[in-house]
Amino acid sequence: MSAAKGKSFTPVELLARLVAFDTTSSKNNLGLIAFVEDYLAGHGVASRRIVSDDGQKSSLYATIGPDDEGGVALSGHTDVVPVDGQTWTSNPFTLRSEGGKLYGRGSADMKGFIASALAAVPSYKARKLKKPIHLAFSYDEEIGCIGVRPMIAELGKDLPKPRMVIVGEPTSMQVVDAHKGPVRWQVDVKGRAAHSSMAHLGVNAVTYATRLIGELERMEQELKQRVIDIRFEPPYSTLQVTKIDGGTATNIVPVGCTFVFDIRALPGLDPDEIETRLRRFAEKRCLPEMHEIAPEADIRIERVNAVPPFGAERKSEVVALALKLTGQNETYGVSYGTEAGLFQEAGAPAVVCGPGDIAQAHTADEWIAESQIAKCMDFLDRLGDWAET
Ligand SMILES: [Zn+2]
C-alpha cells in the first residue's frame, strides 16, 4: 500500500501504519522507509536515504522549510526490540486501541514520536518556516545506536546539519538533558588445555578470567564512591560482568573463557580509563604467569559497543527551547542510552523529549497513552510557531 498523494493522516492512523511494519532490529526496515518516503513525497517533501552497507536497511533524512543548515532535527529510530518469548494479548504488529491506550510493538519506543512528527508535516509545509525542521529517522538503535552513525557522518556534508536535535525517545514529554552511556567489552582468555589431573601442565583460562573479574569488581566499588550525580538512578556509574562462558569438560583444564562486561557511564567518565586499567592488570598480573607454561596464552580485550554518555551544556539552547515548548522548568536524567550523545559529539546539541513512558518500552503489550500523542502534537505545533520566527 502506498500513502495516497498528499493525504493527511492523524498521528494514530500513522502509528498504526508504522507499527504494522515488523522492523525488529534483526529484520530490514525498507518497507517502513518506503512508506515514509512516499508519504513525505505526497506532501512535497524530498527525503534522502542513507543505506546500510548490506543494503538491507536505511535511515531517512528530510528537510522542511529552507533547504539549509540550522533549525531543529526531530530524531527517531525506526527499529524495535524483538517480541520473542513475550506473551502478547493481541498481534504486536496490529495497533490496538483500548481505554485510551494504543497497544503495539514500538508504540512507545518510538514509533509514537515518528508518527507524531510525520503527522505534523502538512502543517509545517503550510507555514512559512524561516528555520528548517529536519526529520532524521535511523535504524539499529536498539542494538547499540548503529544506524544513526553513518547519517550523522553526512551532516554538514551531504545532509544539512541541524543547529539542534530533539531525540523523541519516550520521556513522557519531560525534558531529559543527560543520560548514561552504555559501553560493552568482550574479554577472551586463552590458556592451555591439559588433563585435569595434570593441572600443572595447563593454563586454566577460567582462573585468569576470575582474576580479571576481581579487578573489575574493585573498579565497580570505586565507581560507586567516585562521582555521585543525583539526576540518575543509581547515582553513580555501574560496572558489571553480564555474560560468561568457559571450559569444555569437567576433567579438562579449561583452554578458553570468554566474558562480557558492561558499564553505564555517567557523563564525564572516560571508558578508556577503565579499559587501560584492565589491560595493564592483564599484562602485569596475568600474562607473565600464563606465559611461563604456555607462550601461546593470551588475553584479548575488545570494545564491542559504545554509546557516549550524554550531558547537555549548562546553557544549552535546545534544552531551553524544549522547556519552553513543553511549558516546563525542570530537566531530568535517565539511565538508558539514546542517540543524543552521538549528535552532541558531532556538534549538534541535543535534548531528549518524546511521548510515552520508558516503563512500557520493550515489554509485552507495549502501549502509549493517546494523551501522550496529543501532548506531543501540541509540542510539535509550538515548534512550528518557533520555526516561523
Ligand atoms: Zn528507543
Image: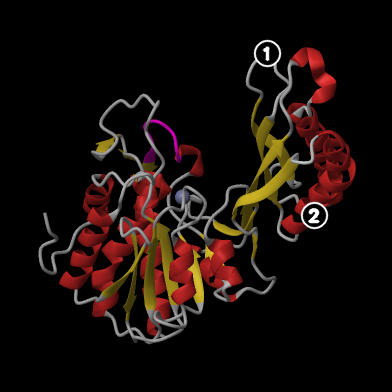
Q: Number of marks in the image?
A: 2
Q: Which residues are magenta?
A: 361-367
Q: Of the residues shown, which amino acid type is indicated by label 1?
A: Thr
Is 175 rendered above or below residue 356?
below
Where residue 389 appears, x then y in whole percent? 41, 85
In terms of depth relative to the viewer, which is nearer, 107 or 310?
310
* 10 Å crowding of disc 2: few (<14), some (14-19), many (20+): few
Instruction: Evaluate whether residue 47 shows in this view.
Output: yes
Please, what secondary structure does the residue beneath circle 1 have? loop
Of badges 1 and 2, the one in the foreground is: 1
- Does label 1 or label 2 sit earlier along the sequence? 1
Magenta span has 362?
Answer: yes
Where residue 177 appears, x then y in whole percent? 61, 61
Q: Of the residues shown, which amino acid type is indicated by label 2?
A: Thr
Seen at 40% across and 30% down, the residue is 364
Label drawn at residue 276: 2
Seen at 34% across and 86% down, the residue is 66
Please name the residue that numbered disc 1 is placed on.
250
Magenta part, dominant SS: loop
306 left or right of 389 in image: right
Magenta span has 286?
Answer: no
Is 173 rendered above or below residue 370?
below
Between the residue at mark 1 and the residue at mark 2, the CA separation in whole angstroms equals 34 Å
